[in-house]
Image: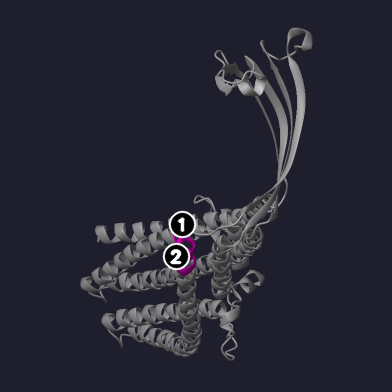
């Protein structure tokens, strides 16, 4: 008897404690709708941030390639000391002394020059193609950022509904524990009055202990899934969150004809990559074409027996300027078949990505059909499980009344409770299956961003 009273008091205190803790955390937690979760993730999740940085990187790549088409201007200077001046042997006939050899030194001990040079590409296929490729790369990053956002939305939505379902399972256990505690009080009263056996009281106490253990496991699952959700959102793990009940309403999706998968982000990204490979091929083929550039330079040169800086002709140092303008023409003739091999390699890459495009379109079509079928099956399951849960509740109520009146055994009552918990959990699972299928259906339509409006 003392053990039963102690266990009863402990169970009541435990239930009261968890109720107080739950109420406190609910008051301190942040109410989080699906829209709030997705919006937060798109602003704070690391993949979303990196995607934005890649878009910014695309702008810099365009600027980098554009610079190759602009004039390249540079300044240069040097200072040279010649301790030993090289001599040159020349025929003396040029100096009126035929038959003799003159050894002459050309140059000065010191030379210094400073100047400006310019190089402007006039015709270079690789530059023009590179500029187009850079703009396409920028568009590639933009589409990739959109795909990353969709992936973030999908992960957050899946995790969000997982948390919701586990919390619903926790509510089922709480209700079950509450009902079982009522039954325990009835049995205890009957036992105290000699109307029930001790084994019945022991069985109900074991039942309560098992429910508490299952409840603790479910609480742990809630914590783990909430942490996963916050990780996918980029939210600090210590943040307390709560999910409104209205977030799990079933709103049947319109099952229309299959969407145009060629407008899906995954497909568009591959098409943009195909375009980049086309430019890569053209860039390699540019190696067959000549290049023409304009060059120009202006320099100032000082020479003398002393370091020329800040010196004048009276010091034996003379300064003079000179300039040059020219055209550079480069015509490739034979490169050992290197360019040919690179072109064939680029063509091979193009053929591979065309295969990827066909495979991606097929997989996207399959994803839509599977999601549509899962939606249909989930709706049927939801209706069946909902009716089953209502029926299980009616069976439990009737069995409970019969037990109080002595018309049903404790085993019948416990079995009815188990059936109700199972039916309620099956209904919640059916809801989760529907919501996950709904996400896949929305994704297959390319409309994941509409979840930010919910």
| Percent of width and height locating residue 331 | 59, 57
In the image, taking residue 435 as reference, residue 403 lies left or right, namely: left
**Where on the picture, by quarter, is residue 256?**
bottom right
The stretch drawn in magenta includes residue 340: yes
Q: Residue at x 31, y 69 (%)?
A: 188
Q: Exactly how many numbered labels are in the figure?
A: 2
Could you tell me which quadrant the N terminus lies in?
bottom left
Q: Which residue is denoted by mark 2 in the rendering?
A: 341
Would you identify the image quadrant in which residue 396 lies? bottom left
Foreground residue among 454 and 417:
454
Q: Which residues are magenta?
A: 335-344
Give the percent coordinates (x, y) of residue 235. 54, 53
Front-most of residues 177 and 157: 157
Q: Earlier in the sequence, mark 2 or mark 1?
A: 1
Asked whether residue 423 is drawn in magenta, I would say no
Residue drawn at the location 59% of the way across and 55% of the way down: 54
Task: Assign the magenta stretch its main secondary structure.
Answer: helix
Crowding around mark 2 (Cα neighbors within 10 Å: few <14, some 14 to 19, many 20+) is few
Query: Is 193 or 278 nearer to us in this picture?
Result: 278
Look at the image and tell me whether residue 203 can be seen: yes
Q: Is residue 12 visible?
A: no
Q: CA distance from mark 2 to mark 1?
A: 52 Å
Relative image position of residue 15 (x, y in whole percent): 41, 60
Above or below for 314 versus 244: above
**Is disc 1 placed on a helix, strand or loop?**
helix
Residue under label 1: 227
Q: Is residue 12 above or below residue 447?
A: above
């Amino acid at each position: 008897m003392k053990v039963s009273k102690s266990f009863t008091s402990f169970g009541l205190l435990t239930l009261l404690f968890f109720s107080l803790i739950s109420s406190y955390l609910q008051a301190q937690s942040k109410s989080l709708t699906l829209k709030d979760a997705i919006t937060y993730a798109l602003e704070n999740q690391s993949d979303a941030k990196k995607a934005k940085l890649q878009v910014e990187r695309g702008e810099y790549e365009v600027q980098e390639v554009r610079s190759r088409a602009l004039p390249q201007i540079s300044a240069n200077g040097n200072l040279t000391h010649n301790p030993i001046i090289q001599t040159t042997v020349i025929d003396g006939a040029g100096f009126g002394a035929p038959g003799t050899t003159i050894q002459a030194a050309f140059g000065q001990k010191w030379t210094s020059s400073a100047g400006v040079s310019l190089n402007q590409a006039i015709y270079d296929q690789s530059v023009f193609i590179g500029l187009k490729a850079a703009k396409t790369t920028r568009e590639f990053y933009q589409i990739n950022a959109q795909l990353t956002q969709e992936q973030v939305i999908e992960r957050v939505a899946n995790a969000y509904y997982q948390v919701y379902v586990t919390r619903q399972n926790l509510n089922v256990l709480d209700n079950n524990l509450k009902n079982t505690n009522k039954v325990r009080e009835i049995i205890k009263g009957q036992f105290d009055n000699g109307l029930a056996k001790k084994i019945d009281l022991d069985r109900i106490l074991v039942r309560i202990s098992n429910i508490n253990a299952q409840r603790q496991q479910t609480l742990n699952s809630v914590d783990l899934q909430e942490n996963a959700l916050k990780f996918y959102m980029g939210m600090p793990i210590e943040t307390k969150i709560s999910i409104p009940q209205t977030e799990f309403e079933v709103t049947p999706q319109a099952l229309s004809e299959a969407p145009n998968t060629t407008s899906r982000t995954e497909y568009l990204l591959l098409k943009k990559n195909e375009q980049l490979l086309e430019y890569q091929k053209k860039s390699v083929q540019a190696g067959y074409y000549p290049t023409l550039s304009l060059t120009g330079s202006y320099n100032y040169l000082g020479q003398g027996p002393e370091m020329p800086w800040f010196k004048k002709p009276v010091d034996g140092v003379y300064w003079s300027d000179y300039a040059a303008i020219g055209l550079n023409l480069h015509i490739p003739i034979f490169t050992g078949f290197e360019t040919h091999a690179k072109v064939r390699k680029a063509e091979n890459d193009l053929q591979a990505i065309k295969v990827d495009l066909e495979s991606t379109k097929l997989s996207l079509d399959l994803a839509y059909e599977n999601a549509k079928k899962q939606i249909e099956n989930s709706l049927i399951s939801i209706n069946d499980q909902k009716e089953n849960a209502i029926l299980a509740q009616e069976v439990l109520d009737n069995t409970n009344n019969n037990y109080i009146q002595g018309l049903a055994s404790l085993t019948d009552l416990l079995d009815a409770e188990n059936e109700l918990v199972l039916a309620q959990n099956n209904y919640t699972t059916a809801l989760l299956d529907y919501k996950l299928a709904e996400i896949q259906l929305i994704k297959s339509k390319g409309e994941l961003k509409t979840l930010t409006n919910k």
